[in-house]
Image (cartoon, rainbow, N blue to C red):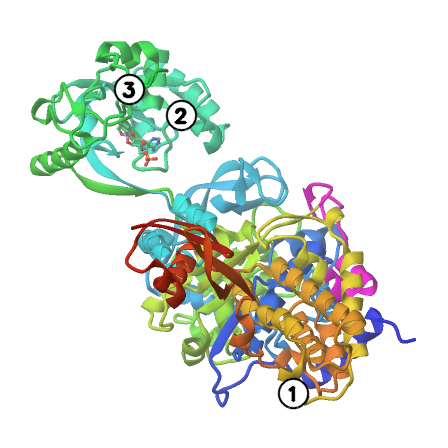
Amino acid sequence: EQVYDAASIQAKWQAVWAEHDPFRAGGDEDRRPRKYVLGMFPYPSGDMHMGHAENYAYVDVVARFWRHRGYNVLNPIGWDSFGLPAENAAIQRGADPREWTYSNIEQQKTSLKAFGTSYDWSRVLHTSDPEYYHWNQWLFLRLHERGLAYRKESPVNWCPHDQTVLANEQVVDGRCERCGHEVVKKKLTQWYLRITDYADRLLDDLNQLEGFWPQKVIQMQRNWIGRSVGADIDFEIEGHPEKVTVFSTRPDTLHGATFFVVAPDSDLAAELAAGADAEVQARFGEYLENVRRSTDIERQSTDRPKTGVFLGRYAINPVNGARLPIWAADYVLADYGHGAVMAVPAHDQRDLDFARAFDLPVTVVVDTTAPITGAIPVIELDDDGEPIEPEGESLDSIDPARTGVALTGEGRMINSGSLDGLSKRTAIARMIEQLEAAGTGRASKSYRLRDWLISRQRFWGTPIPMLHTEDGRIVPVPDDQLPVRLPSVEGLDLTPKGTSPLGAAASWVETVDPETGAAARRDPDTMDTFVDSSWYFLRFLSPGDSGEAFSPQEASRWAPVDSYIGGVEHAILHLLYARFITKVLFDMGLVDFTEPFSTLINQGMVLLGGSKMSKSKGNLVEFAASMQSPGADAVRVAIAFAGPVEDDIEWEDVSTTGAQKFLARAWRIAKDVDSETGVIWAEGDPALRRVTHRLLADAPGLVEQTKFNVVIARLMELVNATRKAIDTGAGASDPAVREAAEVIAMVLDLFAPHTAEEMWEMLGYPPFVGLVPWRQPDPTLLVDESVTAVVQVDGKVRATIEVPARIGAGELEELARGDARVVRSVGEREIVKVIVRAPKVVSISTRP
Ligand code: ANZ
């Protein structure tokens, strides 16, 4: 007896697919509508594990689904092959990062093919190929021309272990995202991309993604951009030539400002301290030393005792001339707003904590006990349900100076001159008007988002295509001299030293200014790899094109990506950068859309023993090994069946044995059915046909909602019903059994493509089941089963009616009242009561 042999089925179909390449996207001549399905491309940093498998399995479900639905599907794959993981691994092994990277890519390609993925393999790209990074350099030059790439010296996040600069996003809880070492600040001159110019658009355009991206990701993007609306207010400083501006979201509270705080690590703090006496200078210097050692996270922590130094200087409140003592305190950050705040301790908790720590005055300017018109009063009830008279809460009883709790709620302005009596909202607007009229302030916005630092002092990345001339100019490498290729690694020491290893490649670094012919040096830094991944989805549309980064025509045909699938770890950085670059390309007229990814699907993580699978934790279930046993299809089914896509999967709870049994059961159905095609479905058993057609009707919606596990559950239901029909019902020759077997093969293709192809062949069809159009469900088979409802009038059965089993009470009542027999029996009498127990009984009572 022939048995289900996963390994040989897998090998057989992979060879057929490799030969015929059936999943290549259609070209210009293809008239079908298009879908662009993309999985976040992998790093070639070693062997792949079940976390990767999960991603590729889901991507393949979506790609295969749209093919069945009649779309011309583009589902490409490439490698994000520059970057630190490869470089570090190369350093540890003393290998050439190039050789190491490309051999990993080969290994991963083999694994992905063994997984039965339906990629268009003709479009593979590697970001570390000069053919690719050529266009990173091109992109950099375009950004530079538009003033969006610039250099500045600033304190940067520096990982002393990896000896490299990190973007804010790569610092997690004050530590290096890659190696976990504590990050310190260091001053360097670096290249930045001006993403802050796009802050408003990056924020506002999130609205169009609502409902298409996970809400969590949209919120993370919003928080990361962090737009605050308020005012800039200018303060005179005694004995200081220039005014100092602060940003405040609460300009209404300006009369309540009782002191002034500057970030200790700001230039302003240094200037103010320099003008103070020797003792202040000494104390400030000591304080600054301590501050330098703490991270931004620590500084913003609310439960940390407030520290600070009085600088012996005063700021003048522009509305009332009050003298506000100036302090340097680390809860104010140098790089947010203007690095200085007006402190309003009555209404800001951080300011209040500080005021209480240093005995500074607290002035209440918003009476939060005063009712605001339009606000709905909250009336509390006592145990007897009687309203409790409000305590008559007085401003005194909630005095922040005593309670330690700042008054941040709604209320009416007091102690604020002409603002008195106004609500917070009106007062904010009024104060901004007054400041603008007096020329001492203006409406303003602040953002948490910072410009994107892209310089890396590492070898394995895209060289920045700029030259430093002998006379101190910085000039671009001309387009026709791109790509600036990485030199050979030979003779270079890659161990991190804080300067780029490329600087030591003398014959590479030393060149000439293309305009003057004078000596010049190449910029030795390489680009953050997030530059590479910010536009790769466009390169897939015309890979290998040596004349341009991507074809705008192809982009307008295929892009934006319809379904983008990947891990939530990329919720901020990668997506934000890709959105930014897309908007720049839009402004350049190269793409006709402003958001790169129309739908985003985030899969959960695969855990082993409760923690994320990762090489560093050594808890990998290796991908390549699992392809041998239990096999690709079983792994894919088990993953998709393990739970909702967005949930984490505990690998120990995943049953590949269960999946194998299910696949064998499905396969056996195809084996038992005659290989005779072309039977007349309508002659088949209607009960089984109903199960089949309900799956055909429901699965598309379920797949679109990424409820893959439910689709598998429904497939299992159909497999069981079909087996029952074969063994104890209509028998294997019933057309309904054959129909069910065909539908099982087609839907199973989403999850277990090898088994599905095998079934399809056993059912007598030529390949490829992956390209078979979705069968239309027969609407007559989707109608519910019917039941007989009884209608009584005054206790006597007057009618029976056939109704759908799932009929609602209202609908049933309407049918009953409209039935001719019921109408006759009610006659002229008045109906006083109708009791409905859907779907079985309607009982009508009447009176004369
Ligand atoms: C006066 C005030 C009164 C404030 C009040 C708040 C409440 P978000 O919402 O995060 O943007 N601030 C401004 N620059 C700062 C900096 N560099 N470091 C730390 N704090 C800073 O916060 C804006 C508020 O944070 C600003 O509004 C300012 O305090 C403070 F009842 O001004 B506010």
- The verdict on label 1 being within 8 Å of ligand 1 is no
**Among numbered discs 2 and 1, the one appearing first in the sequence:** 2
Q: CA distance from mark 1 to mark 3?
A: 82 Å
Could you tell me which secondary element the residue under label 3 belongs to? loop
Q: Which residue position holds label 2?
A: 330
Give coordinates of residue 269: x percent, y percent. Answer: 33, 27
Which quadrant contains ligand 1? top left
- Circle 2 packing at 10 Å, graded few (<14), some (14-19), many (20+), is many
Query: Is 572 on the left-hand or right-hand side of 99?
Result: left
Q: Which residue position holds label 3?
A: 345
Q: Can you say whether 842 is above or below 386 in the image?
A: below
Query: Is 24 on the left-hand or right-hand side of 94?
Result: left
What are the residue bounds of the magenta stretch?
Answer: 608-635
- The verdict on label 3 being within 8 Å of ligand 1 is no
Q: CA distance from mark 2 to mark 1?
A: 80 Å
**Among numbered discs 2 and 3, the one appearing first in the sequence:** 2
Q: For the view shown, which residue lies furthest in the right direction?
A: 1
Q: Can you say whether 185 is above or below 44 in the image?
A: above
Q: Residue at x 54, y 78 (%)?
A: 776
Amino acid of disc 3: Pro
